[in-house]
Image (tube, rainbow, N blue to C red):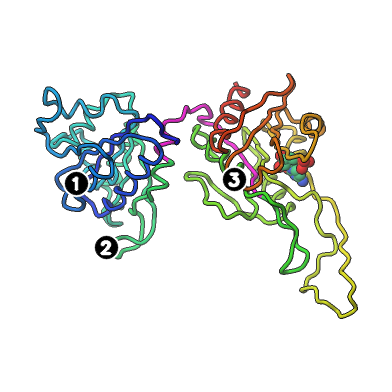
Amino acid sequence: MELAGKKIVLGLTGGIACYKSAEFCRALIKAGASVNVVMTPNATQFITPVTMQALSGNPVYVEQWDGRVTNNMAHIAVTRSADAFVVVPCTANFAAKLAHGIADDLLSSLCLARPAHVPFMVAPAMNVEMWQKPATQRNIAQLRADGVGILGPAAGEQACGDVGMGRMLEPDELLQEVVAALQPKVLAGKRVLITAGPTFEPIDPVRGITNLSSGKMGYAVARAAREAGAEVLLISGPTALATPYGVKRIDVQTAQQMHEAVMAQVNGQDVFIGVAAVADWRVANASGQKLKKDGSGDAPQLAFEQNPDILASVAALPQRPYCVGFAAESEKLLEYGEQKRQKKRIPLLVGNIGHETFGLDQNRLVLFDDDGHVELPQADKQALARQLIANIAQRLV
Ligand code: C5P
């Protein structure tokens, strides 16, 4: 429940992407938010206020002269107690009005009258030609300069059949953005490099050695760092996970590839967090062709050689970023965790309490530093990732 207790004002303007606003509204509610919907009259041509009322569970506002709001000042009242205000979709026309402070209907008046402290975001959605016009680009640049969060748009196929920029973000991406807007920006201006997932060490072209890491913790840390305002680069082994919105990702398979990618990107990073479960050994005699049963009954003999330790290599750099390691042990975590921190010469090591965390959504962590260790009690991995990022941010100041 990432938005538990939060009040969100959701504005809809008149574009075909309104059909996604219904799902976005549901996503907000599922995340624990209460939602007040405001629609322009044009938006009601695409989706009815009844639909949005049923989904939000609250009355929908359309008209400026709505007598339901006490003292008849809907344009001020609806956003006064909001935690965030988001316009989904935002048409080219509405962006133009916002950029010029035009307030000629309830929603545009609400935008102009919103309290300064309420995070305000718009999700542009329009035909690619409309998006590319200098007028639209000027208006969007102006909104950015005015501190408005511009969510997307993405490139892709559009309802009109064109392909290009102007497609609205998907409801899940919009949800991530609203959650992100409400997080403290403790890593603003920082660059964070993160490894995540397992590695895959080939035996032959179709077989290999890997481990049970799902990548969930590393991806959650990447998302939390980005929510905190950092520029985040994720170097990931093979996983089935979606890249957190706004995070850049480089995919690798083997520990050596991960090592190369990290060493190529580490320059200028403020923080390095090694969450990946990197294979300690690779197959030294991997076969170029698929190994065959030769009928003798003899099993192939694999030889191993050691992989580079990525974290230790980064920690040994003269201009090293602030280095954080992870450890999953099957026993004696307190003893091995602190030993590992010292061996790798890193200031902070995060221990997974119980190696059975692999693939699960929940975790328990223990943080080791020069002063000893503290535990972060059981919670879902995203919540723990946010606590960890807050903790790392404190160490940077
Ligand atoms: O030595 P161990 O694998 O237990 O240490 C775990 C920590 O070291 C993790 O942060 C992991 O990402 C990192 N590591 C690494 N390169 C390796 C092995 C582990 O960066 N070859």
Q: Which mark is residue 50?
A: 1
Q: Which residues are magenta?
A: 177-197
Q: Which mark is residue 196?
A: none
Q: Amino acid at mark 3?
A: Lys
| Outermost residue, top side | 371
Helix, strand or loop under label 1 = helix
Residue 310 in view in this figure: no
Where residue 374 sits in the image (x, y, percent)? 68, 23
Marks 2 and 1, how far apart at CA: 26 Å
Marks 2 and 3, how far apart at CA: 37 Å
Q: Which mark is residue 160?
A: 2
| Outermost residue, bottom side | 295
Residue 395 in view in this figure: yes
Q: First in sequence, mark 2 or 3: give its number.
A: 2
Position of the N terminus by quadrant:
top left
Q: Residues within 10 Å of mark 2 (few under 14, many from 20)?
A: few
Q: Is residue 55 above or below residue 64?
A: below
Q: Which mark is residue 216?
A: 3
- Which residue is at 55% across, 52% downward? 241
Position of the C terminus by quadrant:
top right
> Left or right of 182: which side holds 392?
right
Marks 1 and 3, how far apart at CA: 38 Å
Q: Nearer the viewer, mark 1 or mark 3?
A: 1
